[in-house]
Image (cartoon, grey):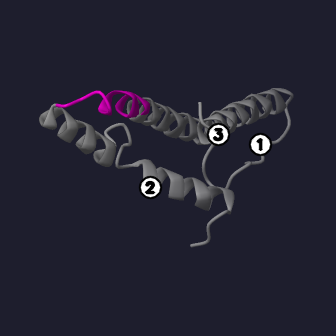
Amino acid sequence: QTKIQMKMEKLTSTTKAICDLETFHHGAGNCKAPFFHTWPTSYFYEVCLKLSEMYKKELQLKQTIVQDIAHSADQDLMMVYLSSWLYQPYIENSSMLLLEAMLLETGHRQC
């Protein structure tokens, strides 16, 4: 595991804990004050989890490529490795939009 992957997993775990805290807080009959601008806390957790899983799979692919590329003499296979490295097949097109939306929601990015 890399530092960034561990941080992403910690962020996901933290947002899950916030969801649990919010559920506990509302269960006690307290008023519902949002933690974020417009997103429900559960959606924030879902987005964190989705991004974390995407990057986890992408990291596993890159680690596999790094391990295998030095042992390959086949040019076609090397082109597949290169394409996979550059294209990032596990990173969905929506990832940047989700990340930007998250930054806006938390106030870390201004419009």
Q: Secondary structure at mark 2?
A: helix
How far apart are the two marked residues, 1 and 2, measured between alpha carbons?
27 Å
Q: Residue at x 48, y 50 (%)?
A: 98
Q: Amino acid at mark 3?
A: Lys
> Which one is earlier in the sequence, the residue at label 2 or at label 3?
3
Q: Is 55 in front, or is 106?
A: 55
Q: Amino acid at mark 1?
A: Lys
Q: Residue at x 60, y 48 (%)?
A: 39
Eye-nearest disc, 1 or 2 = 2
Q: Which mark is residue 3?
A: 3
Q: Secondary structure at mark 1?
A: loop
SS assignment for the magenta stretch, majority: helix
Task: Give the residue at mark 1.
Answer: 32
Task: Give the residue at mark 2.
Answer: 97
How far apart are the two marked residues, 2 and 3, measured between alpha carbons?
23 Å
Specify the quadrant of the image occupied by residue 96.
bottom left
Q: Is 44 in front, or is 38?
A: 44
How far apart are the two marked residues, 3 and 1, measured between alpha carbons?
35 Å
Q: Residue at x 15, y 31 (%)?
A: 74
Q: Position of residue 56 (x, y in %)?
A: 49, 32
Eye-nearest disc, 3 or 1 = 3
Few, some or many residues within 10 Å of mark 2 (<14, 14–19, 20+)? few
Few, some or many residues within 10 Å of mark 3 (<14, 14–19, 20+)? few
**Can residue 28 be found in the magenta stretch?**
no
